């Protein structure tokens, strides 16, 4: 189990996936990079910029339904100013899917401008774990998708999905393992579920999240758990939540595990409210 203040980055995983993505990027015209709208900076792997280089780059701020709307709009403007094409989405519900398909169609038209032969737009989707990559692919492909198999001039074994309108999706893993620039980044990734809970000290993770929510969304935290005030320390606030929810064990002991699990789950589900951690 990892110490919350010493979450490790696994370079072996990164090296393998980096090489895979680098190899597959040679086959595509564009990369769709998924970010978690609650933590756009922490969920953005710095390696992707180096890998994509001169490819068309589309950034999707996913899980926008869980994030603060004003913060998400501000992040979208910032990323556009840096030169990325940006869309705000909720791949789980499908919100924003039509806009993404429309953008991809425009990119295909741009690719073929002035060309005699109408070539398909080929793309791949990349993102860190649990950012909604599978949900987005399912939304884009739908039930009408068809694996088209090997294409002329394409490395054998690569499978392509037709999205219609002359757009092809490379059906291959695009998982970028998080790179922890610092422990605060690692914690935010853990709060949002990009790191497996099984390797974390859950009570400490829950207490750290309560501390951050106390700073960024105190009113939402108080309202959700019917707290009269945010206590002096995250531990005291955690204990106040436990008392309000009745998470008390024999001997009047606080059930820290259950309290932590509840707060973490309710934050991730958006039950506490729409909260951006960055």
Image (tube, helix red, strand yellow):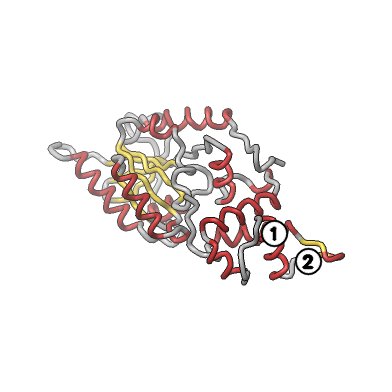
- Residue 53 sits above or below residue 257 on the image: above
SS for dot 1: helix
Which residue: 15% across, 40% down? 113
Sooner in the amino-acid sequence: mark 2 or mark 1: 1
Q: Kindly report which numbered mark, 2 or 1, lies closer to the viewer in this rendering.
A: 1
Disc 1: CA contacts within 10 A as few (<14), some (14-19) or many (>=20): few
- Residue 18 sits above or below residue 145 on the image: above
Q: Which residue is mark 1?
A: 236
- Front-most of residues 120 and 81: 81
Disc 2: CA contacts within 10 A as few (<14), some (14-19) or many (>=20): some
Residue 265: quarter of image: bottom right
Which residue: 48% across, 62% down? 274
Q: Which residue is mark 2?
A: 248
Position of 134 with respect to 260 (left or right) is left
- Residue 274 sits above or below residue 59 on the image: below
Position of 261 with respect to 125 (left or right) is right
Position of 215 with respect to 25 (left or right) is right
Q: x%, y% of residue 123?
A: 35, 40
């Amino acid at each position: 189990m990892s110490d919350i203040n010493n979450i490790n980055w696994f370079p072996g995983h990164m090296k393998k996936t980096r090489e895979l993505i680098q190899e597959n990027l040679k086959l595509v015209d564009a990369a769709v990079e998924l970010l978690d709208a609650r933590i756009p900076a922490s969920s953005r792997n710095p390696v992707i910029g180096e890998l994509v280089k001169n490819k068309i780059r589309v950034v999707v701020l996913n899980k926008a339904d869980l994030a603060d709307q004003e913060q998400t709009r501000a992040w979208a403007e910032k990323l556009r100013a840096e030169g990325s094409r940006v869309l705000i989405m909720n791949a789980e519900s499908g919100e924003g899917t039509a806009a993404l398909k429309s953008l991809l169609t425009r990119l295909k038209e741009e690719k073929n401008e002035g060309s005699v032969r109408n070539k398909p737009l080929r793309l791949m989707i990349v993102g860190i774990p649990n950012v909604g990559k599978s949900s987005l692919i399912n939304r884009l492909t739908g039930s009408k998708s068809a694996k088209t198999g090997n294409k002329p001039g394409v490395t054998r074994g690569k499978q392509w999905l037709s999205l219609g309108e002359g757009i092809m999706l490379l059906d291959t893993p695009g998982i970028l393992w998080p790179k922890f620039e610092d422990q605060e980044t690692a914690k935010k990734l853990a709060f949002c579920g990009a790191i497996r809970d099984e390797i974390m000290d859950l009570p400490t993770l829950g207490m750290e999240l309560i501390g951050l929510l106390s700073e960024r969304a105190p009113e939402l935290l108080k309202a959700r758990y019917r707290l009269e005030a945010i206590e002096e320390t995250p531990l005291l606030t955690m204990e106040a939540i436990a008392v309000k929810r009745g998470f008390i064990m024999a001997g009047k002991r606080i059930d820290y595990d259950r309290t932590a699990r509840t707060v973490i789950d309710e934050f991730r589900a958006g039950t506490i409210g729409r909260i951006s951690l960055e």
